């Protein structure tokens, strides 16, 4: 299966996370943290069993230079249609390469993601359209299509309910796949679970120890 991971420019992303670092007034550190969350998510995604291509749909490819060191492909988002449009654009690029492919939509704010946990969710879906709710049960961290069928992403506030109502199977996913980071509390939960090296390096420098 192939994955789509949309990314806003790090300086604009994760506004609810502003202030989570010890130096809250520092926009550079905020952007570094947002990028680090994405780098750790993508590092796990590229290592997950069952994942073939990882396609990043970037609102500003120049703003995510360090992502180029990973085994991912990067395309520029056409226009500014929002998150679901970015997922659908990525899906169209992947289906141009393989019309029958299973497409997965992965949020880029999962710094504690373990490759095996993403692989387990893909296996659990078993070729059915399915999704993983976030830790709170209201949002969505991962949506996967059936082979060759539309992903139909319905992300945004309250997306877990919309994905369930649209007929997608609710996956009993492991915690690392459910632990998205929107707020300072989410960041703490992810730290307790164990974040990847990029996020850890930023937090070691700019956040109080646990
Ligand atoms: N390419 C692209 N990525 C997006 C867009 N909107 C959100 N994303 C990405 O989707 C992921 C999840 O989005 P949210 O959790 O809503 O993150 P956010 O918009 O950065 O956060 P807030 O400002 O706190 O709402 C993040 O990794 C964003 O970078 C978009 O319009 N285009
Ligand atoms: C866009 C979403 O993410 P969040 O709630 O993390 O903003 C979502 O859950 O659909």
Image (cartoon, grey):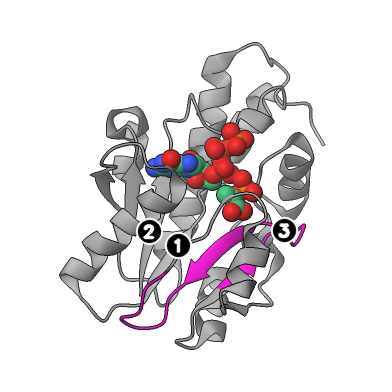
Whether residue 184 is situated above or below residue 116 in the rendered picture: above
Q: Is residue 127 visible?
A: yes
State the SS at label 2.
Answer: strand
Q: Residue furthest top?
A: 25
Could you tell me how far apart the alpha carbons at marks 3 and 1 are, in whole angstroms? 17 Å
Q: Is mark 1 within 8 Å of ligand 2?
A: no
Residue marked by disc 3: 138
Q: Position of residue 178 (x, y in %)?
A: 67, 61
The answer to which quarter of the image holds residue 142 is bottom right
The chief SS type of the magenta part is loop
Q: Position of residue 34 (x, y in %)?
A: 54, 34
- Residue stretch in magenta: 131-151
Q: Quadrant of the N terminus?
A: bottom left
Q: Is mark 3 within 8 Å of ligand 2?
A: yes
Q: Which mark is residue 105?
A: 1
Q: N-terminal of the two: label 3 or label 1?
A: 1
Q: Nearer the viewer, residue 47 or 149?
A: 149
Left or right of 187 on screen, residue 131: left
Q: N-terminal of the two: label 1 or label 2?
A: 2
Q: Position of residue 194 (x, y in %)?
A: 69, 51
Residue marked by disc 2: 4
Whether residue 191 is situated above or below residue 142 in the rendered picture: above
Q: Quadrant of the C terminus?
A: top right
State the SS at label 3.
Answer: loop
Which residue is depicted at the point 45% across and 62% down?
105
Magenta run includes residue 105: no
């Amino acid at each position: 299966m192939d994955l789509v991971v949309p990314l806003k420019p790090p300086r604009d992303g994760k506004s609810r996370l502003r202030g989570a670092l010890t130096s809250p007034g520092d926009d550079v550190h905020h952007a570094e943290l947002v990028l680090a969350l994405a780098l750790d998510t993508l590092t796990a995604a590229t290592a997950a069993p069952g994942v073939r291509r990882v396609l990043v749909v970037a609102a500003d490819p120049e703003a995510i230079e360090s992502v180029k060191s990973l085994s991912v492909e990067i395309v520029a988002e056409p226009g500014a249609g929002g998150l679901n449009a970015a997922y659908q654009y990525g899906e169209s690029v992947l289906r141009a390469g393989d019309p029958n492919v299973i497409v997965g939509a992965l949020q880029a704010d999962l710094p504690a993601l373990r490759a095996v946990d993403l692989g387990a969710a893909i296996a659990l879906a078993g070729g059915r359209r399915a999704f993983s709710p976030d830790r709170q049960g209201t949002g969505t961290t991962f949506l996967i299509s059936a082979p060759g069928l539309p992903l139909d992403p319905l992300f945004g506030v309250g997306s877990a309910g919309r994905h369930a109502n649209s007929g997608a199977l609710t996956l009993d996913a492991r915690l690392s796949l459910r632990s998205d980071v929107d707020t300072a509390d989410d960041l703490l939960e992810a730290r307790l679970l164990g974040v990847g090296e990029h996020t850890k390096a930023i937090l070691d420098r700019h956040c109080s120890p646990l």
